[in-house]
């Protein structure tokens, strides 16, 4: 009986801390990948890149994602904790809510640590980019945390094996 109680306590601890922390880390790296990808799209908008430029960008995708991801982890730790508490206390469990809070977190972090809007309107596109990257991070957080973005849908259980598989909308 004591082993059953202990296993239940361990499972509750894992659900309370491991999944949200893992989801936050996954969201940071997904946002970083989205930002690196957006840099590639912006480079394409300037003109047709040479094969050497494409190869250089392809070689920089993983290191760039890791580098930016570490910065996102550091900069979003406290805002994410505050917004996670807000979401939990208010019972907000939809994916669009997490996405919007991710976008707001991105804008707040850039504004607090970089003050880009004090330099004028030329930094508005940067804020839009950071908001969109935050939307990606918030969505990934909700899906990986397994909190049911579309009425029960979640990513496969990465942290606690043995949980039911993904159920996408309209696929019973």
Image (cartoon, helix red, strand yellow):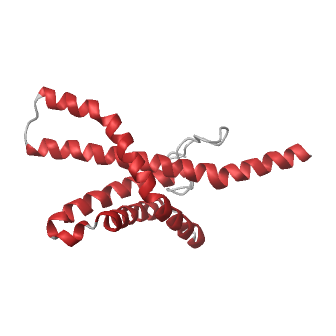
Q: Could you tell me which residue is drawn at 14 percent across and 27 percent down?
A: 52
Q: Could you tell me which residue is drawn at 52 percent across and 67 percent down?
A: 82
Give the side of residue 68 with respect to residue 84, left or right: left
Give the side of residue 151 with respect to residue 64, left or right: right
x and y percent of residue 22 in the render? Answer: 55, 47
Q: Could you tell me which residue is drawn at 13 percent across and 26 percent down?
A: 51
Asked if residue 63 can be seen in this view, the reply is: yes
Residue nearest the viewer, comparing 132 with 119: 119
**Quadrant of the rendered image containing residue 119:** bottom left
Q: Is residue 162 above or below residue 71?
A: above
Q: Is residue 163 above or below residue 104?
A: above
x and y percent of residue 8 in the render? Answer: 79, 49
Asked if residue 146 can be seen in this view, the reply is: no
Residue furthest to the left in view is 47
Residue nearest the viewer, comparing 44 with 28: 28
Instruction: Tell me how many marks there are.
Output: 0
Q: Could you tell me which residue is drawn at 43 percent across and 50 percent down?
A: 28
Residue nearest the viewer, comparing 20 with 115: 115
Give the side of residue 1 with respect to residue 40, left or right: right
Give the side of residue 42 with respect to residue 59, left or right: left
x and y percent of residue 158 in the render? Answer: 57, 40
Q: Is residue 172 above or below residue 88?
A: above
């Amino acid at each position: 009986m004591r082993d059953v109680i202990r296993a239940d306590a361990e499972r509750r601890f894992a659900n309370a801390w491991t999944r949200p922390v893992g989801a936050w880390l996954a969201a940071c790296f997904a946002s970083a990948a989205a930002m690196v990808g957006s840099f590639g799209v912006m480079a394409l908008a300037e003109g047709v890149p040479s094969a050497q430029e494409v190869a250089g960008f392809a070689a920089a995708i993983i290191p760039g994602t890791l580098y930016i991801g570490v910065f996102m982890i550091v900069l979003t730790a406290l805002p994410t904790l505050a917004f996670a508490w807000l979401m939990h206390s208010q019972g907000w469990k939809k994916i669009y809510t997490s996405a919007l809070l991710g976008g707001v977190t991105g804008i707040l972090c850039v504004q607090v640590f970089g003050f880009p809007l004090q330099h004028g309107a030329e930094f508005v596109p940067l804020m839009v980019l950071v908001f969109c990257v935050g939307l990606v991070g918030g969505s990934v957080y909700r899906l990986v945390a397994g909190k049911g973005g579309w009425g029960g849908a979640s990513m496969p259980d990465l942290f606690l094996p043995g949980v039911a598989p993904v159920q996408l909308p309209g696929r019973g």
